[in-house]
Image (cartoon, helix red, strand yellow):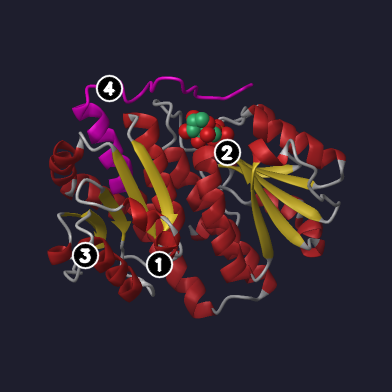
Amino acid sequence: IQDSLRGRLNAEQGTITLSGLEKIQDKLREANRIVIVACGTSWHAGLIGEYLIEELCRLNVEVEYASEYRYRNPIVSPKDVILAISQSGETADTLVALENAKKQGATIFGIVNVVGSSIARLADAGAYTHAGPEIGVASTKAFTAQLAVLQLIALKLAEIRGTISNELFQTLLRELDDVPAKVEWVLKNQVENIKAIARGYKDAANFLYLGRGYNFPIALEGALKLKEITYIHAEGYPAAEMKHGPIALVDESLPVVFVATKDVYHEKIVSNIQEINARKGKVVAVVSEGDDAINDMAEAVMVVPACHEIVAPLVAVIPLQLLAYYIGVERGLDVDKPRNLAKSVTV
Ligand code: F1P
């Protein structure tokens, strides 16, 4: 992580490098805002990017679905820096949205997995995610790699802008260094548990996914993975938004998946779980290791190692990806090639 941030790595090593940021540093200095443009899973990474950059760098960020941005008439100026996020680098909606923005003078920074892809070539600068080829159609490891790049960009920008304390900076560096071991821990210790949970819920007709703060986009991503791989209808919502509508859906047939890792919202998430319990919904929760507060309130828990809340999405998403995967397997589906989905949506 330190080497990535300090530019001590080169792209040939297949690792994340931030030298692209230096290429556009004048534009970044003048930028009024950053606009993140992406589709699907990459859009969810973008939403976390917004939370990160606004919190750590105190810079205005907007997140746009490329599939809307390309057709509406957005305000774009030469002072805009656009972060384009795409696994394939070929998604037509994202590509056209970027071409339009570029014509209006915006600077494009690509966060792309496939080297030499159309979006990578169109961008003025960028950082490759280097997650390796995605074997399945649904994006998984590319998502975690996108989050890693966004974390590094936010840290670098925060350092340049002087908006982060040295203590938090050092804490986040350490936390990022620990992520691979924590992901391995989940893969080693939770797979059998998640398989059993998948067997129990494979016939549900609908799912609701809820989270707060950095875990809200993870709830969206958990729901999208389930839709893509299992064809079960799922919705992701901010947990605090539940009372504004989705709560009407809750009954004894509805599994509600909470992304409830230990963070500043923990008490509030616990009271959201109580609200689901009171309506007899079935609670499944992603919880931090050592946090027993939710065990008695949930039908099932998936445990992840404790993390700083800013880094938590990188780890919290893993059980949700596995849950979708094993429910798909239980339903006898080809999880690598979901119906109606293409690896790159080029139309
Ligand atoms: C965007 C995306 C993926 C999704 C599926 C369809 O792709 O929505 O997130 O899993 O493959 O396309 P990309 O621009 O990140 O390649």
Q: Earlier in the sequence, mark 2 or mark 4?
A: 2
The residue indicated by pointer 1 is 309
**What residue is drawn where x is 33% and y is 50%?**
249
Q: Residues within 10 Å of mark 2 (few under 14, many from 20)?
A: many
**Magenta stretch, residue numbers:** 318-347
286 to 345, vertically: above or below:
below
The residue indicated by pointer 3 is 278
Determine which quarter of the picture holds residue 213: bottom left
Tell me if 311 is positioned left or right of 3 in this view.
Answer: left
Q: Quick check: marks 3 and 2 in contact, CB under 8 Å?
A: no
Residue at mark 4 to residue at mark 3: CA–CA distance: 34 Å
* Helix, strand or loop status at disc 1: loop
Q: Quick check: marks 4 and 3 in contact, CB under 8 Å?
A: no
Quadrant location of the C terminus in the rendered image: top right
The residue indicated by pointer 4 is 333
**What residue is drawn where x is 61% and y is 29%?**
91
* Helix, strand or loop status at disc 3: helix
